[in-house]
Amino acid sequence: MVSRGSRIRWHMRVLRDLSRTRGRFRRTRDWLALFGVYALHTLAGALGMRTIRWRVALPADSPAVTIRLGSADFHALKEIYLDDAYGFAMPALAAVVARAGVVIDLGANIGLTVRLWSRHFAPRAIVAVEPDRANLALCARNAGSAAPADLLLFECFVGDAAGSAGIDRGLGTWAYRMDRTERVTRMEAIPVRTVPDILADAGVASSEIDLLKCDIEGGEAAVFRGGPAWLSRVRAVLAEVHDPYTAEALIADVRASGGQWEAAVSGSAVLLVRR
């Protein structure tokens, strides 16, 4: 049970973080609107209402995106666009990727990172993979006109072998996990596909992958373990690691695929760039 004092401290930290983002917005009114959105988001969460959709302006990126109030969507937006969680990787990616051809986004959630890659790299194709149907629908909506002509959406998990699995939604909309227990899978069976299968169906099986982003809530170990052969066509990997998998293990697995890779780590995020 979270104490009232802990909740107050949490909200104060969020408000403090929001106050520091003023310089990221071109228009003061868009920045001020964030505080109103956060108030509505908090109220919706307290009332257990997590389906109300709301438009939120992003700093230096239009049009606005859609989130579900009371869900983890607001915090995903804050992490990616306001806290700049991937900012540490952007200079190195800009130097290597420039105008990307193909971007693979494993764990695309509601499309915020798809928007980020579109704005920074103008790729000709983005393959967005997300196991939850409602998240994927918002991903398509939020990508909008910012996405390339070839935005390819896949509703599935990513794993080291094809099959099916259930989905664990216990940690909220931004942290859905694969659950292979028979009871959960019977309730809601979601396909599990390998990266080569996804690339083949997307029509990029023989293409160079300029950026592969991976945030699949603990499934990354199975995807990268042993340095799979498809990594030989990837120029940059940006991945979130989750216990018990570590940044060191990910770096070792990617380097096992061959070639020279430079690595940088920021919190749970790891960037590897092929040289």
Image: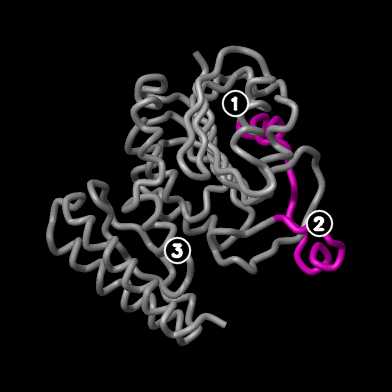
Circle 2: element type: loop
In the rendered image, residue 253, in percent from the top left (x then y), is placed at 68, 27
- The colour scheme of the drawn protein is one colour
Q: The disc labelled 2 sits on which kind of residue?
A: Arg
Residues at marks 1 and 3, CA–CA distance in whole angstroms: 30 Å
Circle 1: element type: loop
Q: Quadrant of residue 237?
A: top right
Residue 127 appears in the figure: no
Residue 169 appears in the figure: yes
In the rendered image, residue 2, in percent from the top left (x then y), is placed at 52, 80
Which label belongs to residue 204? 1
| Contact between labelled residues 3 and 1, with CB atoms less than 8 Å apart | no
Residues in magenta, as a range: 178-202
Which sits earlier in the primary sequence, circle 1 or circle 2?
2
Task: Identify whether 122 is placed above or below 111.
Answer: above
Which sits earlier in the primary sequence, circle 2 or circle 3?
3
Query: Which residue is under mark 3?
Result: 73
In the rendered image, residue 87, in percent from the top left (x then y), is placed at 35, 39
